[in-house]
Amino acid sequence: MAWPVLVFDIETIPDMAGWRRLNAASPELSDAEVNAQWKAERAAHGQSDFMPLYLQKVLAISCVFRNAEGLRVHSFVDRDGQSEGRIIQTFFNAIEKHEPQLVSWNGSGFDLPVLHYRGLQHGVVADKYWDLGEGTHGSDREFKWNNYISRYHMRHLDLMDLLAKYTPRNNAPMDALAKLCGFPGKLGMDGSQVYEQFLAGQTEEVRRYCETDVMNTYLLYCRFQKMRGGLTEAEYTQEIQFVKDHVAALAGQEPHWQAYLQAWV
């Protein structure tokens, strides 16, 4: 298994300011009221109440970063409601610096398109991420054959997409697969509750939820690497124990890691 590896997950909330710019809404209504009204109208017409990806505002980006020096869990969070562009730029800066193996669960279907749309709005620069090896200034010709953008290239590995053989009807939920593999899975929250938690001022709870999600994805990536021969049985066992020990150390700092450790069979 080649290092460095950067596993990522994002959590989003409806961009109600953007929605107001594109639609008529009473200024007297709060964002929560406008969102509830929109959802009710959609439901009345039998339509999905999920905001389009370009109107998904990034609240948190959580990462597991694994290299020869160890493992780190870190989150970039828009705590003041004004830092979305900065946290997206910081994420792409990490790709620029480390050129990691990117790993996600449904990153091609959700996380990355959201980051593309929101990054475009904020003027984010991500040269290496968008490098297609075209031979232009600063371009890496190796990226022509393996880049972050092309669907069947492996520099970004969407585990859900790959395991389903790029067939959406075969997609499996990360939570279920993690639990079936003996990992903790989701704890106490799911994506549908993020906006509610945000409105209640529980941004840190959202961040904690995102971090455990991304840890599940890293563990599934390790299991996948064992399946494809990237890790031997001994190397896999050693890596899982290394991660478990790291989580145990984190458990002394924050309660969500203690709960995660307790759920690990």
Image (tube, grey):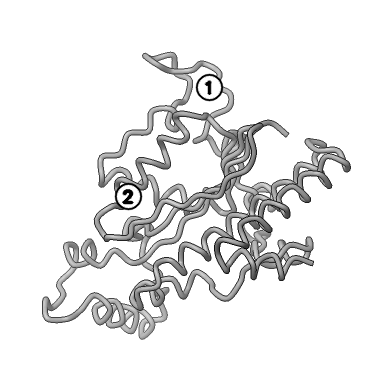
Task: Estimate the x, y position of residue 69 in percent, counting from the top left.
Answer: 63, 33
Quadrant where the N terminus is found in the figure: top right
Q: Nearer the viewer, residue 138 or 6?
A: 6
Task: Estimate the x, y position of residue 157 in percent, counting from the top left.
Answer: 61, 42
Q: Check the image and report above or below for 78 versus 41.
A: above
Task: Estimate the x, y position of residue 202 in percent, counting from the top left.
Answer: 40, 72
Q: Earlier in the sequence, mark 1 or mark 2?
A: 2
Query: In the drawing, does residue 107 fall left or right of residue 138?
Result: right
Separation (CA) of disc 1 from disc 2? 25 Å
Q: Check the image and report above or below for 168 versus 195.
A: above
Secondary structure under the numbered disc 2 in the rendered image: helix
Quadrant where the C terminus is found in the figure: bottom right
Q: Nearer the viewer, residue 153 or 256?
A: 256
- Residue in the image at 61% along x and 38% along y: 5
- Residue in the image at 24% along x and 56% along y: 82
Q: Which residue is mark 1?
A: 144
Q: Check the image and report above or below for 109 versus 149.
A: below
Q: Amino acid at mark 2?
A: Arg
Q: Amino acid at mark 1?
A: Lys
Q: Is residue 223 visible?
A: no
Dividing the picture into quadrants, the one containing residue 183 is: bottom right
Residue lying farthest left? 27
Q: In the image, which is nearer the foreground, mark 1 or mark 2?
A: 2
Q: Nearer the viewer, residue 63 or 15?
A: 63
- Residue in the image at 53% along x and 72% along y: 190
Dividing the picture into quadrants, the one containing residue 226 is: top right
Residues at circles 1 and 2 in contact by the CB criterion of under 8 Å: no
Query: In the drawing, does residue 24 fall left or right of residue 57?
Result: left
Q: Which residue is mark 2?
A: 118
